[in-house]
Image: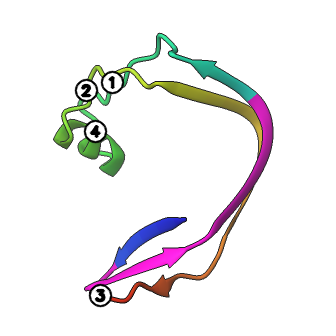
Amino acid sequence: MRYARHGDDVLRSSVRARARGLVYLAPRLRLAPGDSAHPLAQLVRELGLDGARPLVCRATVARQTVLGAGVPVPRA
């Protein structure tokens, strides 16, 4: 499932993905956003993840992903 904001609404959509690849447990990789202005790099810095290590990494040569249409999530 994927959740995203659209205006004041929260949308839920299903994600179907398939790929063959390799899984690396506790890799030596570290997040290093540098001084990039890219939104993902800014988010990594805002979350304080600069220099953090992931628990798992997955590498693949070919991947197929289908993202379904978003459906508004009812508010409680």
For the residue labelled by badge 1, is the local secondary structure a helix, a strand or a loop?
loop
Amino acid type, label 4: Val
Residue identified by numbered label 1: 32
Viewer-nearest of discs 1 and 3: 3
- Tell me the residue at 26%/46% (across/down): 43
Residue type at numbered disc 1: Ala
How far apart are the alpha carbons under marks 1 and 2? Answer: 6 Å
Residue at which label 4 appears: 44
Q: Amino acid at mark 2?
A: Asp
The image quarter containing residue 23 is top right
Residue 18 counted in the magenta span: yes
Whole-Å distance between the Cαs marked 1 and 3?
37 Å
Location of mark 2 (residue): 50
Instruction: Report x, y in % for residue 6.
Output: 35, 81
Provide the secondary structure element on which disc 2 rests: loop
Q: Are marks 2 and 4 in contact (CB under 8 Å)?
A: yes
On screen, residue 42 above or below 68:
above
Mark 1–mark 2 CB contact (< 8 Å): yes
Tell me which numbered mark, 2 or 4, is placed earlier along the sequence. 4
Question: In front here: 32 or 18?
Answer: 18
